[in-house]
Amino acid sequence: MRSLLAVVAIASLTGCATAHETFDGNAQCGPHPYCGTATDINYLGALTDGKAGVLAGFIPLVIIDLPLSIVGDTLVLPYTAFNGPATR
C-alpha cells in the first residue's frame, strides 16, 4: 500500500499545474497568482466539452491535481505576487 501511495504522490507532483505554470519558461500564463489553478480549470473545461475523445481519460488526474494546485498556488503566492507581469 505504501508503494502505491508513493507512486501516486510522485505522479501527482510531476503533473502539477502550479509547478509547470510558475517555474517553466514555456508556461501558458507564467507567474501569475493562482495560474496553476486557472490552468487546471481550463483543462477541465476542455476535457469535458465533448470533443476531447480519448483525452477525456485525463479528467480524474485533473480533478486530483486541482486541490493540490490550489494549495501549491497559495504557497507560491509571495513569489508570483512579486514576479508577476506587473513587475516586469
Image (cartoon, rainbow, N blue to C red):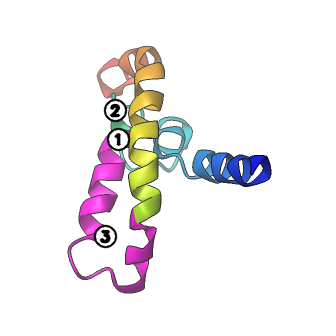
Q: Which mark is residue 34?
A: 2
How far apart are the alpha carbons under marks 2 and 1? 5 Å
Residue 23: percent from the left, percent from the top? 55, 36
Residue 3: percent from the left, percent from the top? 79, 51
Q: Amino acid at mark 2?
A: Tyr
Residue positioned 38% across, 54% down in the render: 63
Name which quarter of the figure residue 59 lies in.
Answer: bottom left
- Which stretch is magenta? 37-59
Residue positioned 43% across, 14% down in the render: 78
Quadrant (top left, top right, bottom left, bottom right) of the C terminus: top left
How far apart are the alpha carbons under marks 3 and 2? 20 Å
Q: Amino acid at mark 3?
A: Leu
In the displayed orientation, state which residue is furthest to the right: 3
**In contact (CB < 8 Å): disc 3 and disc 2:** no
Residue 83: percent from the left, percent from the top? 43, 21
Q: Which mark is residue 57?
A: none
Question: Which residue is the site of mark 1?
Answer: 37
**In contact (CB < 8 Å): disc 1 and disc 3:** no
Residue positioned 65% across, 46% down in the render: 9
Q: Is residue 54 magenta?
A: yes
Residue 6 vertical placement versus 86 (above, below): below
**In contact (CB < 8 Å): disc 2 and disc 1:** yes
Task: Count the numbered circles shown.
Answer: 3
Q: Amino acid at mark 1?
A: Thr
Question: Is label 3 in a helix, a strand or a loop?
Answer: helix
Question: Which residue is the site of mark 3?
Answer: 47
